[in-house]
Image (spheres, coloured by chain):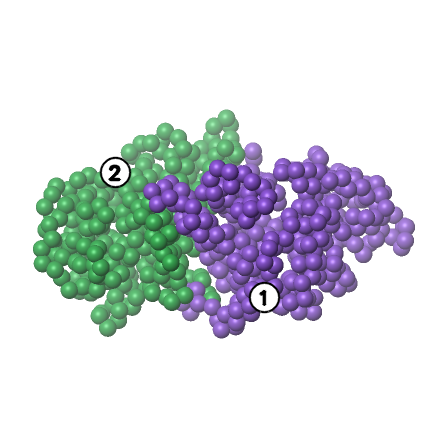
Chain colours: A green, B purple
């Protein structure tokens, strides 16, 4: 057994991380929220140039192979950077459709989360689909028919869509991949919230000393760190389950989504508390990350449906 | 080499062998409580049987009674052990706390003399860390060891230790004593071992929260310890103790297998006692399974690179995680058992949940309270400034 990322996996993760750090992802997210999608699309094309969507497509179909663990690691970084757009849905549709323009990052695509009935950012996508979960899951080309409703995450908009013609697609892993990558994004968001909190409390002084030296502050951050630490191995386990490993446990996927949601929400609440009022402002990044965590905790598997899935498995 | 969870054929074989032996040997009825004199004796006999099968200390070298098992194999053994419903380990203080310190700091003579009877249950060890005035602040301890020329040279122990689990029944104890009265706090402490029936030792049992005589105070009055029973250099005891403190707080004290087995039993309980509409309790059952699985997978990650500390969850985080899980898991089980059954302490098969709950309540207290662990996580893992 070797239940750790290998060198290639780690090297790829740091490539993605550097690319995101060198861009200005939060500014890109704020532009996206304001309706300017150009910087977000440019960032996605740059991410696609690293081979990101190609990691969801077998070589014979023009991709690099089927690499859910590496995809999950990349989406931890995307979550950490709060990069905007229907990126989870785009990668999952790339895996299902093997579409050339999705593979290159030229196009963004989105699909309805069946539990919600909305497609995220359909107004900003090049292609829109609906997913009917009844086995086997069916994918239909769709048209946005409703207004773009604002989400608690200002970078997301939810749109009702009407299904049109069915499309030929490999839909077996579509929903699972969305769940995995959403969980990964949540873990990254939680890490970013913890890191910014640690940085803040080391420098913010009250009563003549850094607030991070007070146990009441330290202990909250320690608990948030523990939650994130133990969500990581579940995310790895979930990635192996999505990859289809015989030795993996399919329950790890809903387990990871529930654990990453909870860890991210705890980190968000802790971040807000230790930042004090400045964290409650629109201008400060904590609020952007906190609101995204709230939205993603509900997307592609709620804690309740994940708990049901864990208990339903034989 | 891509990440995977597949066992090697050797690991599969090891697991199968452990499972078969346990299936043939684990007592059908639970042994009487480990926390009573009668139960202690029954658990000592079980240690002997376990040792006879070669399963009492699987990760130790073969020459000392082990199987040279890897960390992965040890994790698999623990999973099988608890899944089989095998008895609690009465030798745990020796095996989990003293043995790692001896492997790191002991002499060859000490290893050969002390470890084989520990492995067989012939010698059962108690810890002697806390004192009435030194709990979380262990370095403030005042029990002393004074130099003597008696019997070829050694030390005379005087003072008081407390909260020593099962010291009333155990054979020997280990702990820290101040050998240099002029040195302060962490300096001038030595790590010594002594027999609990030696002249000058008085052990007074203390009833635990549930009344069982599982705690004890140890009074020491000029108790002779030969030089051969000092571990490491005199004065370097704090370092010796802390270098293996991770063993106590980490994976090895409470292995993931304990929790995956308990979570599976909880799920079983849910299937028999849960009501379909009770989503709140279903959520708690699922959450316990998820957390036990997270701890199990974290263990596999650590075992995948046993020499790389980066691969392992820091031990203080492990301790915070399992100690809270243990309480939540048992409280969920008691809520599921419902009125009557959940409060009966003896005579029902379900009473083991109540025992487990009582045991779990101590988790956030022993081996460094969870407040101390959170300080360690905040300061050493997150890099926050020192201070309380």
Q: Is residue B280 above or below residue A85?
A: above
For this view, does B115 lie left or right of residue B71? right
Percent from the top left, x then y, of residue B32?
65, 50
| Element on which disc 1 rests | helix
Mark 1 Cα within 10 Å, few/some/many (few <14, many 20+)?
Answer: few
Q: Which residue is mark 2?
A: A152
User: Along the line of sight, which residue is nearer the eye, A76 or A180?
Assistant: A180
Identify the subunit bearing mark 1: B
For this view, does A289 lie left or right of residue B290? left
Name the residue furthest top.
Answer: A207
Instruction: Please tell me in which quadrant of the rendered image residue A295 appears.
Output: top left
Quarter of the image with the C terminus of chain A is bottom left
Percent from the top left, x then y, of residue B257?
52, 56
> Both on one chain, marks 2 and 1?
no
Q: Is residue B251 above or below residue A2?
A: above
Q: In the rendered structure, find residue B24 and report the number of the disc placed on it.
A: 1
For this view, does B45 lie left or right of residue A75? right
User: Residue at the spot x=16%, y=53% of the render?
Assistant: A130
Percent from the top left, x then y, of residue B177?
75, 44
User: Residue at the spot x=33%, y=64% of the render?
Assistant: A243
Q: In the rendered structure, find residue A204 and report the number of the disc placed on it.
A: none
Q: CA distance from mark 2 to mark 1?
A: 58 Å
Mark 2 Cα within 10 Å, few/some/many (few <14, many 20+)?
Answer: some
Instruction: Please tell me in which quadrant of the rendered image residue B18 appears.
Output: bottom right
User: Along the line of sight, which residue is nearer the eye, A40 or B147?
Assistant: B147
User: Residue at the spot x=50%, y=26% of the render?
Assistant: A207
């Amino acid at each position: 057994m070797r239940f750790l990322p290998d060198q290639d996996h780690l090297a790829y993760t740091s490539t993605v991380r550097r690319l995101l750090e060198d861009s200005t992802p939060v500014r890109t997210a704020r532009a996206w929220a304001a309706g300017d999608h150009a910087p977000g699309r440019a960032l996605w094309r740059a991410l696609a140039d690293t081979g990101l969507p190609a990691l969801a497509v077998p070589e014979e179909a023009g991709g690099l192979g089927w690499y859910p663990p590496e995809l999950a690691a990349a989406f931890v970084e995307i979550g950490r950077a709060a990069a905007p757009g229907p990126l989870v849905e785009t990668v999952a549709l790339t895996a299902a459709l093997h579409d050339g323009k999705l593979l290159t990052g030229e196009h963004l695509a989105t699909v309805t989360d069946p539990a919600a009935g909305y497609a995220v950012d359909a107004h900003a996508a090049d292609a829109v689909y609906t997913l009917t979960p009844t086995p086997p899951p069916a994918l239909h080309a769709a048209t946005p028919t409703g207004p773009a409703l604002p989400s608690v995450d200002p970078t997301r908009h939810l749109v009702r869509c009407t299904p049109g013609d069915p499309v030929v697609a490999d839909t077996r892993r579509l929903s699972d991949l969305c769940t995995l990558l959403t969980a990964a994004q949540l873990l990254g968001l939680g890490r970013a919230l913890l890191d910014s909190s640690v940085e803040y409390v080391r420098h913010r002084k009250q009563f003549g000393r850094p607030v991070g030296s007070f146990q009441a502050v330290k202990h909250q951050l320690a608990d948030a760190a523990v939650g994130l630490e133990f969500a990581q191995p579940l995310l790895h386990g979930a990635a192996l389950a999505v990859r289809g490993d015989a030795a993996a446990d399919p329950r790890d996927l809903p387990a990871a989504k529930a654990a990453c949601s909870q860890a991210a929400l705890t980190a968000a609440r802790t971040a807000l508390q230790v930042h004090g009022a400045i964290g409650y402002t629109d201008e400060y990044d904590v609020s952007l990350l906190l609101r995204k965590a709230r939205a993603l905790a509900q997307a592609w598997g709620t804690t309740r449906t994940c708990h049901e899935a864990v208990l339903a498995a034989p | 080499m891509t990440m995977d969870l597949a066992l090697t054929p050797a690991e599969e074989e090891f697991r199968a062998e452990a499972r078969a032996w346990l299936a043939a040997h684990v007592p059908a009825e639970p042994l009487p409580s480990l926390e009573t004199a009668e139960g202690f004796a029954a658990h000592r006999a079980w240690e002997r049987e376990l040792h006879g099968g070669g399963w009492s200390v699987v990760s130790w070298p073969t020459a000392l009674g082990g199987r040279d098992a890897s960390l992965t194999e040890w994790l698999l053994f623990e999973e099988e052990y608890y899944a089989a419903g095998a008895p609690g380990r009465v030798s745990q203080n020796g095996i989990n706390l003293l043995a790692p310190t001896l492997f790191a700091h002991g002499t060859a003579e000490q290893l050969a003399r002390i470890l084989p009877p520990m492995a067989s249950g012939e010698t059962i060890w108690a810890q002697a860390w806390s004192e009435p005035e030194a709990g979380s602040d262990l370095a403030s301890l005042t029990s002393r060891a004074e130099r003597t020329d008696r019997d070829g040279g050694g030390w005379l122990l005087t003072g008081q230790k407390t909260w020593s689990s099962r010291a009333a029944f155990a054979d020997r104890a280990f702990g820290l004593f101040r050998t240099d009265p002029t040195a302060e706090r962490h300096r001038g402490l030595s790590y010594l071992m002594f027999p609990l029936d030696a002249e000058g030792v008085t052990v007074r049992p203390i009833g635990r929260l549930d009344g069982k005589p599982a705690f004890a105070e140890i009074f020491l009055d000029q108790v002779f310890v030969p030089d051969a029973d000092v571990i490491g250099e005199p004065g370097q005891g704090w370092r010796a103790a802390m270098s293996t403190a991770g063993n106590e707080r980490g994976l090895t004290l409470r292995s993931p297998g304990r929790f995956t087995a308990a979570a599976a039993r909880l799920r079983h309980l849910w299937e028999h006692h849960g009501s379909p509409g009770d989503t709140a309790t279903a959520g708690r059952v699922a959450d316990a399974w998820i957390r036990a699985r997270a701890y199990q997978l974290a263990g596999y990650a650590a075992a995948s690179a046993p020499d790389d500390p980066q691969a392992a969850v820091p031990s203080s985080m492990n301790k915070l995680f399992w100690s809270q899980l243990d309480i939540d898991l048992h409280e969920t089980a008691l809520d599921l058992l419902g009125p009557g059954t959940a409060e009966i302490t003896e005579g029902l098969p379900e009473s083991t949940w109540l025992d487990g709950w009582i045991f779990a309540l101590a988790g956030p207290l022993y081996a460094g309270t969870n407040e101390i662990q959170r300080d360690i996580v905040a300061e050493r893992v997150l890099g926050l400034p020192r201070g309380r």
